[in-house]
Every structure is written in C-alpha cells, then in structure tokens.
Amino acid sequence: MHNSITTLTVGLMMSFSSYAGMHQTMDVDSDTGITSWKIKAHGVSFSLTQILPEQSRAFYVNRGFTLQQSEAFASSCVYMTVMRNDNAPGTIHFKRSNWSVSINNKPHQLKSVAQWIDTLKKQKVKMPALIAFRWAQFPPEQEYEVGGDWNQGMLSIGLPAGSYFDLKVRWDIDGKEYETTLRGVKCAQ
Amino acid sequence: MEKSMKQRYGELSVRNKNHFMKIVLLIVLVFSFNTVTAAENGPPLTHKLTKLKQQLPAPALRLKNMDDEVVDIKDLKGKVVVVNFWATWCPPCRREMSSLERLHLATKEKNVVLLAVNVGEDMDTVFPFLGMISPSPSFPILFDTDTETAKQWQVKGLPTTYIVSPEGKIVYRAIGGREFDHPAIQDAVIKLTK
C-alpha cells in the first residue's frame, strides 16, 4: 500500500556525533515537505514524522469528530511517532509521562492522552470517536521485547506551528534508565 | 461462516450507494494517512515472536463476527488460536493484514484458527476496507466495539497479536506489525499444534 505513494526522501542531514552510539537524521519528503526526525540509541530506534493539521483534521473527522472538535488536537503540533526495540540489552519499558520537551532549554509540559480525552469529553465528542482517538495515540505506557516489538501512533507536543523543540525520550530495562534526545524538531506549518 | 463472508465480499460491487461513498471516503482517508507514512514507512516488519516466560491462560474472548454470530475462544480449545487486535486506520495493521491471510491459508487445515479482532470500529467501516486488501481476508473478523476485550488482553497499542496453545494458554506475543507468512512464524504456529 505504501508503494502507491512515490516518496523521494532527501537525506540531508544532521549528525550529532558527540552522542556516542546515537545518530540523529532528518528526512524531508520532496513532494509534501513533511519532515521526519530519527534517532537510534542503546538499541532502540525512535522517530517523529510531522502530521499536517489538515491531515489530522481529516483523520478525526472521518472517525466521527466535528471539524470544531478536531481543531484543538489538529493544531497542537502532532507527530506520527515510531519506537522500536531493535537490539536493546533487554525488554524496554517506558511511560510517556517520563518524556520531556524543552524549548531553548526551558521545559514545556506535554499533555497526556488522558488529559486530551478529558478535554474532548467536555466538547461532547461521541464515544466511538473517543475510542478511535485513544487507540490512534502513541501508547502512554508500553513494553517492547528485543527483536522488533514496536508501535506507531500520534503524539501531540502542544506547541504553535513553526515552533522548534527538543524531545527527551526515556525508558528503562529492569529498572536501569536510558534516554535519548531528538534535537531541533520543528512543528509543521 | 467463511463461505458466507466470501459471498458478502463478492457482493461488494453491487452494494448500495452508501457503501460506495464509504469506500470513496476510506480511500481519501487511507491516502491522507499514506501521505503521512510515505515519509515514515515504518520500520521493516520482522518475523520474531516473543515466547512468554509465564504462559497464562488466555482471557475471555466472546465477540460477534461479520455475520453477527458469536465466536467464543472457549469453543476453540484443542486448536491453536492466533488472535490479532487491529483497526483499519492503523498503518502497521494494514501492512501485516495480507501476511495474516497467507498464514491463515497455510495453516487452516492444520488445526489453527485465526481471529482478527477489530478494536473500536463497526461493520460499515471494516467491510469496505477488507475489499481493498489483497488477498482479501477470509479469516473471521470480530468486533470489539467497546474495546473491553482488548483491555482484558492487556493490549496497549495496535496491532498486537497473541498465539494461544491448544490448552488455552498464551505462548507467543507480537507487539507491532510482523510478516506472519514468514516460514519461522508458520513453523512456530504449526509446532504448537503437535
């Protein structure tokens, strides 16, 4: 199905060689301008791909949101997020609540999936649409076994279009903590 | 049950205008999502299953299929059951769906049953989607519309797949998309039947 879309990915890129074992790249889709940031660290790969506000609106309107109900999330700097345990030293466990966003080294609070659902309930979003919303999000908490467990889902950063930020992703293996940081990520405009 | 489902797929081209519009909307939706995933095709699908250290009894699973008949995993004791939780909007679920059908075709005569549990959607959404998959799934599609079954099975993200032994215990798990028609997975599934 993916082959139906021709993607020419320009592979430019930023390398943060000062981080041992961590390599960040940025790809720009030459057709759409959609940008992805990827990093590999400690045997885990992680990526963010911009979801344009109109794509997010279309998705949620198709799942039962009204245009008005879809607006807050669609315009909140949303990414398709992929995390995978390629060859970490063991089973990785993460909670999204342990991840952090910073802008010019100043912390920015991420809104949780539960907080988004509370907001959407107040907007009287219907239950089937809320269910679709919940399951379309990147999991709030998860475990991945070595060798290919992974998920793909949406992550809202909660920043205006065009903002730049760093995202620190944390996980643990049997209580030992690991982290990596995606730097200079830009919200779609 | 399968014959009935196939008949329904065969009727796709003559379904009413409402279904046609749903297909058009779905294509628009899929295109929209593919635009997103074009830049992020997702990691390559592997064929590794996690063998669980603690093989607990499978939770209850009693859901309606596309023919509005109840399917209960309790009635499948003595068979290997592959339980795949999925949704139409989920890109890796779409990527692995054809390989699930090939796994089904390769194992259905070997005491293996594949159940694809759709999470949170309804017949009107799922039916046109299945017509777009090649090969089109001939295994049972079940509807977990309130997502309670997914919660009981401790599914945290889609797709998630479990392989249940003939004794009713969960032996393998896979979080995220897989190549289910890979010989390694087929062999692991068939080995459980013996």
Image (spheres, coloured by chain):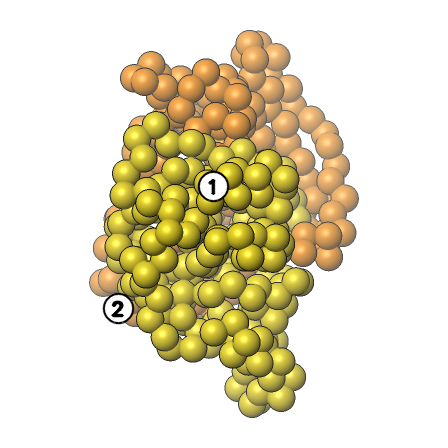
Chain colours: A orange, B yellow
> The N terminus of chain A appears in which quarter of the rendering?
bottom right
Foreground residue among B75 and B141: B75
Q: Residues within 10 Å of mark 1 (few under 14, many from 20)?
A: few
Q: Mark 2, chain letter?
A: A
Q: Is residue B133 above or below residue B55?
A: below
How far is the residue under mark 2 from the one under mark 1?
A: 52 Å
Foreground residue among B88 and A184: B88
Q: Which mark is residue A124?
A: 2
At numbered mark 2, what does the secondary structure look like: helix, strand or loop? loop
Mark 1 and mark 2 in contact (Cβ < 8 Å)?
Answer: no
Kind of residue sitting beneath label 1: Lys
Q: Which mark is residue B194?
A: 1
Q: Which mark is residue B104?
A: none
Q: Quadrant location of residue B131?
A: bottom right
Q: Mark 1, chain letter?
A: B
Q: Residue at x 56, y 66 (%)?
A: B138
Q: Is residue A43 visible?
A: yes
Residue B124's spot in the image, x, y percent? 46, 76
Q: Residue at x 57, y 43 (%)?
A: B186
Q: Residue at x 52, y 28 (%)?
A: A147
